[in-house]
Image (cartoon, grey):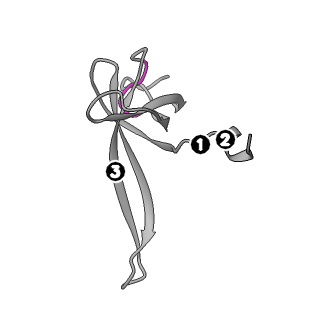
Amino acid sequence: MTDSSNKTKQRKVRTGVVISNKMDKTVVVEVSRTVIHPVYKKFVRRRKRFMAHDEENRCRIGDEVMIVETRPLSRQKNWRVRKIVREAALPGGSA
């Protein structure tokens, strides 16, 4: 056997904020990144939305989550929620 067959493919990992959790076992995560504009050399914020699988429906709007790429789970869902990095503050305030 060669070394290349023993290596597993590194999965893509992203960190973003949950912006919707209205679907069953699915959340929409917005991932932001900054890039330098090629002509104007100014930092520009780019963002992309990913649908991610949330098996236990634990994520709430505003949570910061880590998502990892996985096999296609549906037409638009290729990501899973790995863990909740930081939970959102409750709307009431004191928690």
Q: Quadrant of the N terminus?
A: top right
Residue annotated with mark 3 = 48
Q: Quadrant of residue 83?
A: top right
Q: Quadrant of residue 6?
A: top right
Between discs 3 and 1, the one toward the N terminus: 1
Give the residue drawn at x 34%, y 19%: 25
Q: Are marks 3 and 2 in contact (CB under 8 Å)?
A: no
Mark 3 → mark 2, Cα distance in angstroms: 33 Å
Which of these two is toward me, 89 or 38? 38
Q: Is residue 75 left or right of residue 81?
A: left
Outermost residue, front side:
1
Nearer the viewer's eye, disc 3 or disc 1? 1
Which of these two is toward me, 88 or 54? 54
Principal SS element in the magenta part? Answer: loop
Which of these two is toward me, 53 or 87? 53
- SS state under label 1: loop
Name the residue type under label 2. Answer: Ser
Mark 3, Cα crowd under 10 Å, few <14 / some 14-19 / many 20+, is few
Q: Magenta stretch: give its range.
A: 58-62
Q: Are marks 2 and 1 in contact (CB under 8 Å)?
A: no
- Tag shown at residue 5: 2
- Tag shown at residue 9: 1
Name the spot of residue 54 as percent of width and height, x first. 41, 22
Residue 77 in view, yes or no: yes
Give the residue drawn at x 42%, y 82%: 41
Residue 87 in view, yes or no: no
- SS state under label 3: strand
Between discs 3 and 2, the one toward the N terminus: 2
Name the residue type under label 3. Answer: Lys
Name the residue type under label 1. Answer: Lys
